[in-house]
Amino acid sequence: MRFWGFAIISGLMAIAAQAQPAPPATPDPLLTPYVKPGILARLPDGRRIHLKCMGSGSPTVIMTAGLGDWAQTWRNIQPAIVKDSRVRACAWDRAGFGFSDGSTIEQGVDTTTSDLEAALKSAGIKGPYILVGHSMGGYETLLFKDRHPQEVIGMVLVDPSIPHQEARQKKAAPALPAFADEIYAGMRKKARDCAAAVASGKLTPTSPDPDNCLAYPPTYPRALSQALKTRDMSQARWAATISLTANFSRSTELVANPARDYGAMPLIVLSAEKMQQLPPGTPQAVFDQIPAFQLDLAQAHRELAALSLRGENRRVADSAHYIQDERPDLVIAAIKDVIAAARKTAR
């Protein structure tokens, strides 16, 4: 499946979304704004990075999806934020995902953050910014703040991945990253096979697709699936997505910064407490080590909240990794709280 729906619950749950019961085969009306691209910001090298922006006002909310996801992951959040908050909210797609072009450049969180910077500059989308990141999207959020400390005035991290993630997992629960590595390797092999089928002409937007290379969730409107299939005929799209997954371990170290200090910047970290369902065949050792994994992840989220004197870690007991889907009200509330606090500080 082209969009694997990685639930990178801190690097393990790459297949968790696939383990869930299949969603009803009915197009989701909340996806309507995401059927067509918004701004296709042209970068200096000619590539285009997609930004879907809604609303107007200040500050500007920049929303970053998790690994394997794209702008539509904010469909429950983005329209609600701009409805009565007098802000502009822009969700963007990494190279190779959503409506963004692919890239043959090696992909890591340093590269994707640079793409975001270049896209915002090209599109003329100026700060001050409130940054919102889910899962691995927390990495670009942290790095962007490091690079633009004065322009970022608030932050919400939604069940974020953490610095030194794989190293911490190997220490606290070594069965988990080992299992995830196997899953990722299988996904990359399938992606390479699908890319080869596209290159050979055996796979086209209208050809049979027995390996589900171009399969999309049944909640996607037909027009959206067709648009994405057409884009996925690009070899650079496949190359970018494979590279980003392969470099996830490197990204967990690139984001580490012991000097990070946010002063009194408004910051909320939302932490999911409900365990994501794992698929049949998951090794028993993985289940046995999940409590240790959860304890360390909770500690890491407290450490992220402590980056600011005004940082909060809000625990979400009744949601798994995709809080924006299961408890969108809490994500919306957190973003609005940070917007209000940032505006009060500015005044």
Image (cartoon, rainbow, N blue to C red):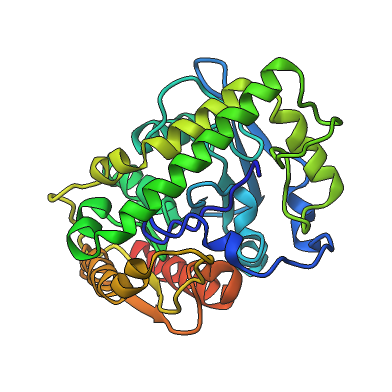
Farthest residue in the bottom direction?
Answer: 317
Point out residue 118 in the picture as x, y percentages from the top left corner.
Answer: 46, 29
Residue 190, compared with residue 131, is above or below; it is above
Residue 327, compared with residue 257, is above or below; it is below
Q: Is residue 123 left or right of residue 245?
A: right
Point out residue 158 in the picture as x, y percentages from the top left corner.
Answer: 44, 64
Nearer-the-camera pick, 122 or 240 = 240
- The C terminus sits in image quarter: bottom left
- The N terminus sits in image quarter: top right
Looking at the image, can residue 96 be seen? no
Q: Is residue 332 left or right of residue 130?
A: right
Q: Quadrant of residue 236?
A: top right
Residue, x 63% and y 22% (percent of image)?
Answer: 196
Point out residue 189 in the picture as x, y percentages from the top left corner.
Answer: 52, 34
Residue, x 56% and y 67% (percent of image)?
Answer: 324
Q: Is residue 246 left or right of residue 253?
A: right
Q: Is residue 291 left or right of residue 192?
A: left
Residue 104, compared with residue 300, is above or below; it is above
Residue, x 55% and y 71% (percent of image)?
Answer: 332
Residue 234, compared with residue 322, is above or below; it is above
Residue, x 37% and y 55% (percent of image)?
Answer: 179
Point out residue 93 in the picture as x, y percentages from the top left corner.
Answer: 57, 41
Question: How many marks on residues?
Answer: 0
Nearer-the-camera pick, 99 or 121 = 99
Looking at the image, can residue 40 be seen? yes
